[in-house]
Amino acid sequence: MRPHQRFAAKFILAQRRVLIADEIGLAKTIEAMAAACRLFAKGGRHTLIISPLSVVHNWYRELQKSVLRSYVLSNRDYVALLLKSIRQGGVAIVSYWQFKETRVFCHFTIY
């Protein structure tokens, strides 16, 4: 990882709730994956990634290369997949629009 990516991963871990808004091509995916892997290594079980719809499947493809389970929360099975990701642990990926339109998240405590 490059120095700015290491810094970003450490920042994510320190803050717990973070909006990563780096420029295109600065490896937001790597930063988030590094932080998620570290959280899981320390006993964490859940990570939620909210991204533009155009890159949801890019996130999924990249996460499939890691040891982390990943779930794309889609229209059809949104709640079922969310509950599965909570039960089994892993990274749930959702588009901004889906997150906004689905009120299910208001029933969860976000740390």
Image (cartoon, rainbow, N blue to C red):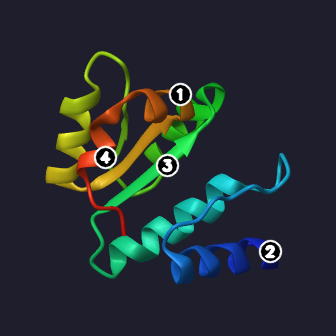
Give the spatial CA distance, label 3 vs label 1.
Answer: 13 Å
- For badge 1, the amino acid type reads Trp
Q: Nearer the viewer, mark 2 or mark 1?
A: 1
Q: Nearer the viewer, residue 106 or 8?
A: 106
Q: Residue 40 carries which label?
A: none
- Mark 2–mark 1 Cα distance, whole angstroms, equals 29 Å
Q: Position of residue 9 (x, y in %)?
A: 62, 74
What secondary structure is found at the residue carrying circle 3?
strand
What residue is pinned by disc 4? 106
Amino acid type at circle 4 is Cys
* Total numbered badges shown on the rendered structure: 4
Res 73 quadrant in image: top left
Mark in front: 3 vs 2: 3
Residue 66 relative to residue 43: left or right: right
Q: Which residue is drawn at 31% across and 54% down?
A: 90
Up-down: is 60 above or below 4?
A: above
Mark 1 or mark 4, earlier in chain: 1
The answer to the question of whether label 3 and label 1 lie on touching residues, with beta carbons closer than 8 A, is no
Q: What element carries label 2?
A: helix
Could you say where residue 105 lies in the image, as x and y percent from the top left? 32, 44
Q: Which amino acid does label 3 sit on?
A: Ile
Check if mark 2's residue and mark 1's residue have beta carbons within 8 Å.
no
Q: Answer whether labels 4 and 3 touch (C-beta < 8 Å).
A: no
Q: Mark 2 points at which residue?
A: 4
